[in-house]
Image (spheres, rainbow, N blue to C red):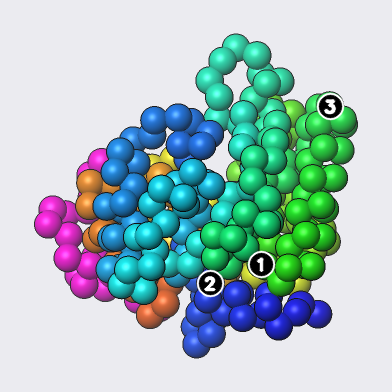
Amino acid sequence: MSTLGTQIRLSRIINNKTQRSFCVAMDHALHLGCSKGLEHPETVLDAMAEAGVDGVILSLGSALRYGAHLVRNGGPALILRLDQTTMWREGTDLDYKDGHTRMVASVNDAIALGADAVINYMFVGHNDPAEETIAFRSTSEVNAAARAAGVVHIIETMGARHALAKNINDGSFVAFHARIGAEMGADIIKTDWPGSTEKLRSIVAQSPVPVMLAGGPRGKSDRGTLELVSSVVKAGAAGILFGRSVFEANEPLAVMRACRVIVHEGGSVDDAIDTAGFHALPLTA
Ligand SMILES: O=C(CO)COP(=O)(O)O
């Protein structure tokens, strides 16, 4: 049973009325350096407040520099990214991309910053069991510290790239690591799209905690993004924690408004497009 502190913080991320959540991941520059769409993070944060985003994942540096934008206009709750990963690093050494992570911030930092949640990756299925041991040990240390502080712990479970998981969207593999994340004490699981609505439905049904989905790279169109959001909601998941498909969009504010309509109002993709205020049709990249 979680503490009152965790329950109060959880209620700021998962809406009590809808039992759903629409969050944005904006920690990409921590892993990728200069990132498309994040040239002016403060503009995106202001748009989140306007669109009614529930929570945002930031690195420590972005929280320190741009956090004031979360205070204005009832901005989103802060979810502090605690680890940095090599997962996206381009290079020839595939093992290097397996999903090695290192802790670069702490639960104490999260408390000092007023964060409601912390998040870290837990890559499962490494070729090297020593890597997996590091992932599990550091996740359990974060979980113990978060529980003691009453801070929400989101575990982002993913298949290690180029290792046991040949396809990161393999439904059985996503089911495997998502459930392990729940057993590690997560308050919320963030994970990859498992290939189909049916598979996601069975993962959600077997999870003792809310499941939220990462968005992956921006697809060909904003409509495609919204169709994915709609599938996530139809599968009974708690919501989305999308990054690139939101802030790389031509009109991030309109995409966020549309996501909110689908997640919290149960609207269709067409309803969402009609009410979001797109200037151009959200059909092309
Ligand atoms: O895990 C992520 C950032 O925290 C990735 O988010 P997207 O795949 O939605 O860009």
| Amino acid type for the residue under numbered disc 2 | Ile
Task: Look at 59% across and 60% down and name the residue there.
Answer: 112
Q: For the residues marked 2 and 1, what is the alpha-carbon distance in whole angstroms?
A: 9 Å
Tell which tag, 1 or 3, sits nearer the viewer.
1
Cα–Cα span, label 1 and label 3? 30 Å
Find residue 233 and report its horizontal and vertical position in percent.
49, 69
Q: Residue furthest left?
A: 279
Question: Is residue 218 among the parts visible in the rendering?
Answer: yes
**Residue 276 belongs to the span the image colors magenta:** yes
Q: Which residues are magenta?
A: 266-285
In primary-sequence order, the first of circles 1 and 3 is 3
Query: Would you say residue 239 is visible in this rendering?
Result: no
User: Could you classify mark 1 by the number of other residues whose Cα lies within 10 Å: few (under 14), some (14-19), or many (20 or more)?
Assistant: many
- Picture layout, residue 67 above or below residue 266: above
Q: x, y (%) of residue 102?
A: 70, 36
What label sits on residue 152 in the rendered view? 1
Q: Residues within 10 Å of mark 3 (few under 14, many from 20)?
A: few
Against 279, residue 51 (above or below) is below
Tag 2 residue: 13
**Type of residue at label 3?**
Asp
Q: Is mark 3 within 8 Å of ligand 1?
A: no
